[in-house]
Image: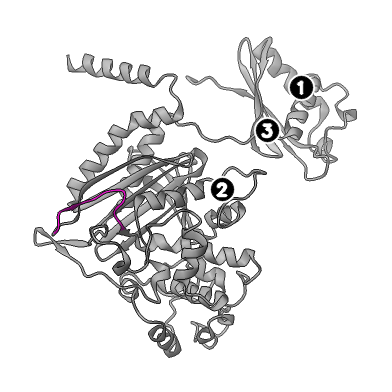
């Protein structure tokens, strides 16, 4: 009886999702999402968690569990301010890119142009390159990993920071050689912002990024947060939650000082998603869309994990790298995601976006170093696997569409191919007309009468594939165009598509 009921539920679920819009599919998933978070909060003994789902520029769901302030019994909510720790880092790099775009600095110039204390540092060896601004943005400056030491520097003064630098930095590697997570590097970026603008990084980021994005309930100093809107942080010790002292804002805040709400942070997530796809629309954000995409690019390799285990039980390869204040991942399903976690005494947070699907998730907690990245990945992986959320596909460029049409006039007999004018100069030196003709005629004969030639599936503006549907089977044609103008076919492949059960 239980098996019959299970089958009925599956059939009903499939029927209910049939014909739904993508947003409706997501909303169907929301009860499962809420249940996953509920179980995680109970399992990890979190005082509270608040989370939100962003789709196509909108915060379409938010929910909260537990208490943001245990003493005063203040419930968590999407309007309560949580310290988001290292999720701050990408705001700092966004500010640096804004200054770069305005011609006020260059990413590959030595950082000591702005921070004189870096000029005479003693590197690991004498042949080390100088630290650049880009090194600082990508955890490549050669500084040692500094968690949790860096967490306790948040409120230090500029004077104390300068004195620390003047005493000399201890390097674990020479600059530019590897990835090693460094809060110090981002604190230095904060100093560079001040040097270039004449304003503290807090004022500059608030005026140039937070306010334009509508993040009006986001703060640097916890004393500035309105009463009853601030989440307090806790540790789980001796079977109880113990409140943790809050760090004041200071010279290290550029690495992890921001305090914000789910509703505010959703504006930032939406802005990152809005950078895709590339398009001709007018710019509307605090920095250019191309600069946001640059922020998300994998600049510094971290690792490849051949046997990454995913929440759905799938084991597959994953690639990870560091971007500009962001983490980049390519997963087993060839899905690109961009994310960052945050952790400080009393707090844990994470956000992750899948730009190709226009979806993102955010979650905050007030437990020390709560691993919110784990539950975020579980939820969004489950969403993508269960909902059939469509992946953004590139529009077909005019030249790809044109070459497809011209190629179909030649296939399968390749008559007058060499005089057609659609092939690059290399083509008939690399492919031979008699062989092309023989192979194509055999494959076309095998699949029978042609019923339909499907649209191109572009990989980019100059490469793609398309399906030819026949009575007895299907073929796939793929080709790549040359960089000249007009672009010509330089590479070609024709293959039989195997049926799913074969």
Which comes before the other along the chain, label 2 or label 3? 2
Disc sitting over residue 408 in the figure: 1
Q: Position of residue 153 (x, y in %)?
A: 34, 76
Q: Which residue is mark 2?
A: 275
Q: Position of residue 96 (x, y in %)?
A: 55, 67
- Relative to 2, does residue 90 appear above or below in the rendering? below
Res 177 visible: no
Q: Position of residue 339 (x, y in %)?
A: 43, 52
Instruction: Please tell me whether residue 171 belongs to the stretch shown in magenta.
Output: no
Gap between marks 2 and 3 measured at Cα: 19 Å
Name which residue lies at 40% across and 77% down. 251
Name which residue lies at 71% across and 17% down. 442
Quick check: 231 left or right of 127? left
Which residue, as the protein is rendered here, is positioned at the far front? Answer: 226
Gap between marks 3 and 1 measured at Cα: 17 Å
Q: Secondary structure at mark 3?
A: loop
């Amino acid at each position: 009886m239980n098996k019959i009921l299970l089958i009925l539920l599956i059939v009903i679920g499939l029927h209910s999702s049939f014909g739904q819009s993508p947003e409706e599919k997501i909303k169907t998933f929301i009860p499962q999402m809420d249940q996953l978070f509920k179980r995680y909060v109970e399992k990890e003994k979190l005082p509270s968690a608040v989370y939100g789902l962003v789709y196509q520029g909108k915060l379409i769901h938010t929910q909260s569990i537990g208490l943001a302030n245990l003493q005063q019994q203040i419930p968590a909510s999407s309007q309560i301010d949580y310290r988001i720790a290292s999720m701050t880092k990408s705001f700092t790099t966004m500010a640096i890119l804004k200054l770069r775009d305005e011609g006020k600095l260059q990413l590959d110039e030595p950082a000591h142009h702005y921070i004189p204390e870096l000029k005479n540092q003693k590197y690991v060896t004498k042949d080390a390159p100088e630290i650049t601004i880009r090194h600082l943005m990508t955890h490549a400056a050669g500084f040692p990993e500094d968690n949790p030491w860096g967490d306790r520097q948040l409120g230090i003064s500029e004077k104390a920071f300068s004195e620390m630098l003047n005493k000399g930095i201890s390097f674990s590697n020479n600059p530019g050689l590897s990835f090693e997570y460094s809060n110090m590097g981002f604190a230095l970026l904060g100093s560079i912002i001040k040097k270039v603008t004449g304003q503290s990084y807090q004022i500059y980021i608030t005026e140039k990024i937070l306010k334009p994005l509508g993040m009006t309930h986001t703060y640097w100093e916890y004393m500035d947060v309105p009463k009853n809107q601030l989440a307090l942080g806790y540790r789980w010790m001796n079977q109880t939650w113990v409140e943790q002292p809050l760090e004041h804002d200071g010279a290290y805040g550029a690495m992890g000082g921001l305090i914000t709400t789910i509703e505010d942070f959703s504006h930032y997530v939406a802005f990152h998603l809005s950078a895709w796809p590339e398009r001709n629309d007018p710019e509307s954000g605090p920095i250019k869309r191309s600069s946001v995409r640059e922020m998300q690019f994998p600049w510094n390799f971290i690792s490849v994990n051949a046997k990454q285990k995913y929440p759905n039980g799938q084991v597959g390869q994953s690639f990870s790298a560091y971007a500009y204040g962001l983490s980049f991942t390519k997963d087993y399903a060839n899905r690109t995601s961009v994310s960052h976690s945050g952790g400080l005494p009393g707090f844990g947070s994470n956000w992750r976006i899948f730009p190709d699907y226009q979806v993102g998730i955010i979650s905050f907690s007030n437990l020390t170093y709560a691993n919110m990245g784990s539950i975020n990945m579980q939820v969004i992986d489950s969403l993508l696997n269960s909902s059939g959320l469509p992946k953004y596909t590139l529009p077909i460029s005019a030249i790809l569409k044109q070459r497809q049409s011209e190629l179909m006039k030649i296939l399968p007999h390749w008559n007058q191919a060499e005089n057609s004018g659609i092939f690059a100069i290399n083509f008939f030196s690399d492919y031979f007309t008699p062989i092309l003709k023989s192979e194509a005629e055999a494959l076309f004969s095998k699949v029978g009468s042609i019923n339909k030639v499907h649209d191109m599936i572009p990989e980019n503006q100059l490469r793609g594939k398309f399906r030819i549907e026949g009575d007895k089977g299907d073929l796939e044609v793929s080709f790549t165009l040359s960089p000249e103008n007009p672009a010509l076919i330089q590479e070609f492949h024709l293959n039989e598509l195997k049926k799913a059960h074969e």
